[in-house]
């Protein structure tokens, strides 16, 4: 899966998670507003109940006096036998209040506004992080297309560097690819690499496929030799020895009609399998890390 596809999926996941969090919190806010009492209301309710209890306690003496007086009246007049019938009234059917009529309380409004602003802030931050730091830049910088210069200048740079041209911006070693090996390479190599190889160069990613160390060139052997665990690769990045699981990874090279060379560092083409040796190049002198394994 390509890096843009992974990033697009990650952005979609963040957006979906944000929406779920927003809906969940908004739903909770609704439920609390419609059916539950706030802490402040519960507090007021408790204190009013306590006040009523106090008043009842304080008025218990008067109740007793009232009862004594009522008993005296009953004793003088005799018990009343008249029963007063209550007036007929139709039962009132209860209907729930209309949520629309209730409106939105200040608390609900503040809750929803807070959740909305938090969701928008988190979403904007996530999007800015992805766009700013993870999305490969379309031009310039590692992760995008890096322009190295004119082909002739790069070939001169390879010769001046003893067979190796290094671009720190592209984190790439550029070396010559021999034309006599092209017919073999066309059967084995990824087609994305062939335009550059046909023009006579190949871009080798500096990161060792074993555990990721930066692989330096060895001028005496004319190979790449990793100082971490001793993996060795020939001048075009094909495995020659050591614990690496494959040859050096590559970047596609593009050469414009005007002769400008650019390297697509957003596309890493995995190195060739162990045993692939299209150039047949052996060590041209003492190796820097010892004998090839
Ligand atoms: S990292 Fe290069 S050989 Fe281990």
Image (tube, helix red, strand yellow):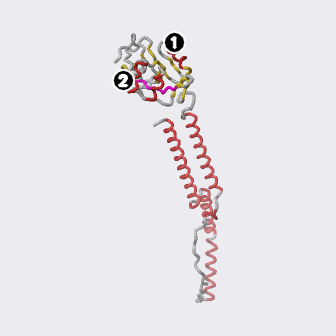
Q: Is residue 52 above or below residue 225?
A: below
Q: Which mark is residue 276?
A: 2
Point 37% across, 21% down: residue: 277
Q: Residues within 10 Å of mark 2 (few under 14, many from 20)?
A: some
Q: What percent of the width, then of the height, locates residue 110?
A: 64, 52
In what element is the residue under mark 1? Answer: helix
Q: Nearer the viewer, residue 31 or 283?
A: 283
Q: Do the residues under discs 1 and 2 have CB atoms within 8 angstroms?
A: no
Task: Give the number of callouts.
Answer: 2
Q: Is residue 285 above or below residue 189?
A: above
Q: What percent of the width, then of the height, locates residue 220?
A: 42, 11
Q: Which mark is residue 32?
A: none
Q: What percent of the width, then of the height, locates residue 60?
A: 61, 71
Q: Which mark is residue 160?
A: 1
| Residue 284 shows in the view | yes
Q: What percent of the width, then of the height, locates residue 27?
A: 55, 55
Q: Residues within 10 Å of mark 1 (few under 14, many from 20)?
A: few
Q: Is residue 83 above or below residue 125?
A: below
The mark nearer the N terminus, 1 or 2, is: 1
Point 41% across, 18% down: residue: 180
Point 50% across, 25% down: residue: 253
Give the residues in magenta: 244-254
Please check the rendered image and state whether residue 74 is part of the magenta-colored stretch, yes or no.
no
Label 1 – label 2 distance at C-alpha: 28 Å
Point 64% across, 59% down: residue: 104
Q: Quadrant of the N terminus?
A: top left
Q: Nearer the viewer, residue 154 or 65?
A: 154
Q: Nearer the viewer, residue 62 or 220?
A: 220
In what element is the residue under mark 2? Answer: loop
Q: Quadrant of residue 284?
A: top left
Q: Quadrant of residue 50?
A: bottom right
Residue lying furthest right = 106
């Amino acid at each position: 899966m390509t890096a843009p596809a992974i990033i697009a999926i990650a952005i979609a996941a963040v957006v979906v998670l944000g929406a779920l969090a927003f809906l969940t919190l908004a739903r909770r806010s609704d439920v609390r507003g419609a059916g539950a009492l706030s802490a402040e209301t519960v507090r007021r309710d408790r204190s009013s109940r306590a006040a009523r209890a106090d008043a009842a306690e304080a008025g218990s003496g008067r109740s007793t006096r009232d009862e004594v007086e009522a008993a005296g009246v009953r004793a003088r007049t005799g018990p009343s036998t008249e029963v007063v019938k209550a007036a007929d009234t139709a039962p009132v059917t209860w209907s729930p209040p209309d949520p629309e009529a209730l409106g939105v309380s200040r608390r609900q409004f503040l809750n929803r506004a807070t959740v909305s602003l938090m969701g928008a802030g988190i979403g904007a931050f996530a999007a800015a992080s992805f766009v700013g730091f993870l999305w490969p830049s379309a031009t310039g910088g590692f992760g995008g297309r890096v322009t190295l210069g004119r082909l002739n200048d790069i070939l001169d740079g390879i010769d001046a560097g003893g067979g190796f041209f290094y671009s720190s911006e592209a984190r790439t070693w550029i070396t010559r690819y021999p034309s006599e090996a092209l017919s073999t390479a066309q059967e084995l190599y990824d087609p994305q690499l062939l335009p550059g190889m046909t023009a006579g160069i190949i871009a080798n990613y500096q990161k060792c496929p074993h555990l990721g160390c930066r692989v330096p060139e060895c001028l005496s052997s004319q190979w790449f030799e990793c100082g971490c665990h001793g993996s060795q690769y020939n001048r075009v990045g094909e495995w020659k020895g050591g614990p690496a699981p494959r040859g050096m990874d590559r970047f596609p090279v593009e050469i414009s009609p005007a002769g400008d060379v650019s390297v697509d560092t957003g596309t890493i083409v995995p190195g060739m399998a162990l045993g692939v040796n299209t150039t047949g190049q052996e060590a041209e002198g003492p190796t820097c890390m010892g004998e090839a394994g």
